[in-house]
């Protein structure tokens, strides 16, 4: 695996890749890699011939500095994992490389409601920072395909809108959520859960699946209320939101027949750790 820290060096190498007409797959991450990240890399290996992974803990998408400070940084182990799945290129830049003009160079894109609901309401500024870094990294790498996880459903919806607004040639591929054996969605933050909270966390996915079985016959408000009650009954758990939304517009959906693509998205505190998860309730591909 090649390892670049400088934009210029990476771009020089990728120029050569493009000249040889090899396709580039790109996976932006914040490191602390787990099997969820590796699933994106494996998919990229299947679909493109040069797979570039970026590890960059992006300061502009953290609305809470304590969360940024405590974000796990495990580069030595990450490199082992990247090598194990035969990643072609690691890009591991410093902040100055990604933001040569400083952190305050905001994007002039409008995501409307996509960026104000759910995560947008509770993590102000988060999506501005996310879109800023993804846009900058795409500008650097110019990949044919960008691989992102359904785990961050709203993030993927915003990136889809960004690619459309910027008339980008990059294709977005959204990959399914990888879960632990007990159903907990894999996340770099899971290692920070207390033993007791880790034990209770799989209840989230169990309740999401259960909600899915009732979706055709029960009132959505009632389902959301029941979910909240169950989560809030777990010690130290506090549900931040549950919303049942259209998978493209992220507008709330009130009934099963109101959309062809319905997703339930949640965020909950488990002690001091914030967990997000989602589950696709309906997806008509035609
Ligand atoms: P992060 O390092 O958390 O910024 O995540 C980098 C990419 O990995 C994002 O596109 C995430 O959606 C994706 N990802 C994170 N966790 C999972 C998971 N459990 N399953 C699939 N993809 C994931």
Image (spheres, rainbow, N blue to C red):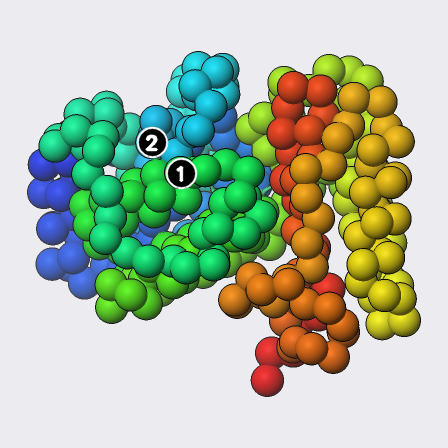
Instruction: Give the camera-side residue of 72 and 247.
Output: 247
Q: Say which residue appears at 81% left-offset and 59% top-offset.
A: 221
Residue 67 x, y percent position in the rendering: 49, 21
Tell me the crowding category of disc 2: few under 14, some 14 to 19, or many 20 or more residues within 10 angstroms, Cα based.
some
The circle on residue 91 is: none
Instruction: Give the camera-side residue of 8 and 97.
Output: 97
In the structure shown, which secondary structural element does the residue marked by tag 1 occupy?
Answer: loop
Relative to 66, residue 136 above or below: below
The answer to whether the residue bearing label 2 lies less than 8 angstroms from the nearest atom of ligand 1 is no
Q: Quadrant of the N terminus?
A: top left
Dividing the picture into quarters, in which one does residue 8 lie?
top left
> Which residue was labeled with disc 2?
60
The circle on residue 125 is: 1
Q: Say which residue appears at 73% left-offset and 36% top-offset.
A: 239
Q: Quadrant of the C terminus?
A: bottom right
Q: Is residue 77 visible?
A: no
Residue 279 x, y percent position in the rendering: 70, 55
49 lies left or right of 178: left
Relative to 75, residue 274 above or below: below
Instruction: Give the camera-side residue of 262 and 22.
Output: 262
Residue 91 x, y percent position in the rendering: 27, 34
261 lies left or right of 215: left
142 lies left or right of 250: left
In the structure shown, which secondary structural element does the residue marked by tag 2 occupy?
Answer: helix
Q: Is residue 224 visible?
A: yes
Relative to 282, residue 92 above or below: above
Residue 153 x, y percent position in the rendering: 55, 52
Q: Which callout, 1 or 2, points at the residue further toward the start of the chain?
A: 2
Q: Are marks 1 and 2 in contact (CB under 8 Å)?
A: yes
Dividing the picture into quarters, in which one does residue 219 lie?
bottom right
Q: CA distance from mark 1 to mark 2?
A: 8 Å
């Amino acid at each position: 695996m090649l390892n670049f820290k400088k934009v210029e060096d990476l771009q020089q190498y990728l120029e050569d890749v493009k000249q040889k007409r090899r396709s580039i797959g790109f996976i932006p991450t914040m490191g602390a890699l787990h099997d969820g990240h590796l699933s994106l890399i494996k998919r990229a290996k299947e679909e493109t011939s040069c797979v570039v992974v970026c590890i960059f803990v992006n300061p502009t998408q953290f609305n809470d500095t304590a969360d940024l400070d405590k974000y796990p940084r495990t580069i030595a182990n990450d490199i082992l994992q990247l090598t194990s799945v035969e990643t072609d290129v690691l890009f591991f830049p410093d902040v100055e490389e990604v933001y040569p003009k400083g952190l305050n160079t905001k994007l002039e894109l409008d995501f409307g409601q996509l960026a104000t609901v759910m995560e947008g309401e509770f993590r102000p500024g988060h999506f501005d920072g996310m879109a800023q870094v993804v846009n900058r990294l795409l500008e650097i790498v110019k990949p044919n395909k960008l691989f992102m996880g359904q785990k961050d459903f709203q993030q993927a919806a915003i990136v889809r809108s960004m690619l459309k607004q910027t008339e980008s040639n990059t294709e977005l591929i959204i990959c399914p959520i990888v879960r632990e054996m007990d159903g907990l969605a894999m996340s770099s933050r899971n290692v920070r859960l207390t033993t007791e909270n880790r034990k209770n966390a799989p209840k989230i996915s169990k309740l999401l699946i259960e909600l899915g079985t009732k979706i055709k016959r029960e009132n959505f408000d009632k389902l959301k209320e029941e979910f909240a009650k169950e989560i809030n009954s777990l010690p130290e758990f506090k549900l931040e939101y549950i919303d049942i939304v259209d998978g493209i517009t992220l507008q709330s959906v009130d009934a099963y027949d109101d959309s062809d693509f319905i997703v339930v998205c949640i965020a909950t505190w488990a002690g001091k750790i914030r967990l997000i998860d989602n589950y696709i309730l309906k997806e008509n591909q035609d």
